[in-house]
Image (spheres, rainbow, N blue to C red):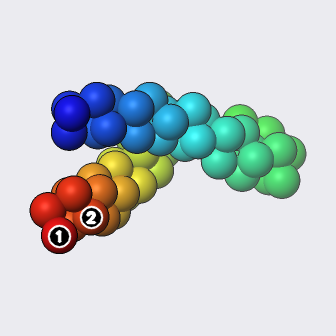
């Protein structure tokens, strides 16, 4: 069952990271040159934090 939770959270993080990046670009007024790198950093940080929290919640 854990794999389902992690997969669903990962899918949600993908769309949430894309939304965050779009908001940043909209406030900036133009797209980033290295959009995929910035997207990777956003999703990496969110994934590490959320998977750590999810892991702690599932094992407590």
Circle 2 packing at 10 Å, graded few (<14), some (14-19), many (20+), is: few
Q: Camera-side residue: 35 or 52? A: 52
How far apart are the two marked residues, 1 and 2, measured between alpha carbons?
Answer: 6 Å
- Determine the residue positioned at 32% across, 38% down: 5
Query: In the picture provided, is 37 more to the left or to the right than 3?
Result: right
> Where is residue 8, by image quadrant?
top left
Q: In the rendered view, tell whether residue 16 sits above or below residue 56.
A: above
Query: In the picture provided, is 49 more to the left or to the right than 59?
Result: right
- Determine the residue positioned at 55% across, 42% down: 17
Q: Are marks 1 and 2 in contact (CB under 8 Å)?
A: yes
Image coords of residue 20 (percent x, y): 65, 47
Residue farthest toward the left in the current orientation of the protein: 59
Q: Which residue is mark 2?
A: 57
Instruction: Look at the image and tell me whether residue 10 can be seen.
Output: no
Instruction: Look at the image and tell me whether residue 26 can be seen.
Output: yes
Q: Secondary structure at mark 2?
A: helix
Quarter occupied by the N terminus: top left
Image coords of residue 19 (percent x, y): 67, 39
Q: Secondary structure at mark 1?
A: loop
Circle 1 packing at 10 Å, graded few (<14), some (14-19), many (20+), is: few
Q: In the rendered view, tell whether residue 25 sits above or below residue 53.
A: above
Q: Camera-side residue: 9 or 16? A: 9
Quarter occupied by the C terminus: bottom left
Numbered mark located on residue 60 in the image: 1
Numbered mark located on residue 6 in the image: none
Image coords of residue 58 (percent x, y): 21, 57
- Determine the residue positioned at 80% across, 52% down: 28
> Where is residue 53, by image quadrant?
bottom left
């Amino acid at each position: 069952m854990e794999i389902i939770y992690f997969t669903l959270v990962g899918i949600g993080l993908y769309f949430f990271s894309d939304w965050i990046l779009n908001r940043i670009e909209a406030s900036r007024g133009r797209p980033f040159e290295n959009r995929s790198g910035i997207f990777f950093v956003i999703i990496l940080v969110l994934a590490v934090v959320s998977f750590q929290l999810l892991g702690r919640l599932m094992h407590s």
